[in-house]
Image: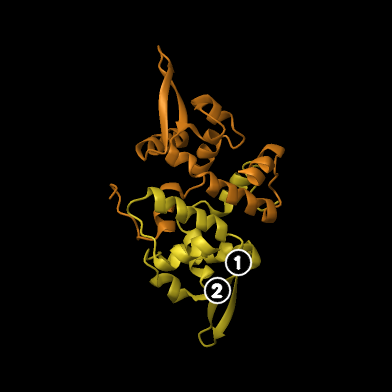
Chain colours: A orange, B yellow
Amino acid sequence: MSKKESRSECLVACSLDLLGDKWTLLVIRDMLEGEKTYKQFQEAGEKIPTNILASRLKTLIEKEIAVKKPYQENPVRYTYSLTDKGKALWPVIRELMRWGDKYVPEGKLTPQAKYAIENF
Amino acid sequence: MSKKESRSECLVACSLDLLGDKWTLLVIRDMLEGEKTYKQFQEAGEKIPTNILASRLKTLIEKEIAVKKPYQENPVRYTYSLTDKGKALWPVIRELMRWGDKYVPEGKLTPQAKYAIENF
């Protein structure tokens, strides 16, 4: 059992305890393309606030959804990438995109995303 | 464009603008079984607070993900059910359950959920 008790044994509830907010799955989306630096996350279109990014990355590492490794010293900086547990979230993101493509007119399906949701 | 501008054109971000919290997809999960009364939502294992339930149902109706219809008068009470746009969220919930089943040890896959994620 994690520090915070789950609200129920329902797998939807358990998953949302980890993923249910407006930012976590966007940070995971970015890492599905490959490892990212802190700066690269901040350059994504949604302009994630730095305190939220730091907090989400910390939680994702604690929950073994992502790992970090240093790519420079003085000052030390890290790249962040998904573990297998994190990569296994692709189908959740794919279905959010499919639903958005059909029902959210503000959204745009990029050619890259179209290719991904049709082929993976 | 909705009242609130979307954070980006990314379909993941657009979908999370509507669905990205700890409760909305649980309310949708309940309606996937069929129409629900306010009381039935409150009886679900997660014990959703009444103010959150009222707020989520209001938004889901505004966004045409759910509809309500009266089933009694004096006082008027409603049942809530999913529109086609709401029912189309089943694959998102299915993938959250599959991921939880593999990676979240606190969660339990009920026989009913197991049947659903294997067959639909």
| Observer able to see residue A93 | yes
Q: Nearer the viewer, residue A95 or B21?
A: A95
Residue A9 located left or right of residue B15: left
Secondary structure, mark 1, is helix
Disc 1 residue crowd, few under 14, some 14–19, many 20+, Cα 10 Å: some
Residue ranking furthest to the top = A74
What amino acid is labelled 2 in the image? Tyr
Q: Is residue B71 above or below residue B57?
A: below
Secondary structure, mark 2, is strand
Q: Residue B57 appears at what percent x and percent y?
A: 53, 66
Q: Which mark is residue B80?
A: 2
Q: Residue A52 appears at what percent x and percent y?
A: 46, 37
What amino acid is labelled 1 in the image? Ile
Q: Residue A21 appears at what percent x and percent y?
A: 48, 48
Mark 2 vs 1, N-terminal side: 1
The answer to which image quadrant residue A99 occupies is: bottom right
Disc 2 residue crowd, few under 14, some 14–19, many 20+, Cα 10 Å: many
Discs 2/1, front: 2
Task: Specify the quadrant that holds the C terminus of chain B.
Answer: bottom right
| Observer able to see residue B55 | no
Which residue position holds label 1? B61
Do the numbered discs 2 and 1 sit on residues whose CB atoms are within 8 Å?
A: yes
Residue found at x 54% / y 78%:
B78
Q: Which mark is residue B33?
A: none
What whole-number distance in Å separates the C-alpha atoms at marks 2 and 1?
Answer: 9 Å
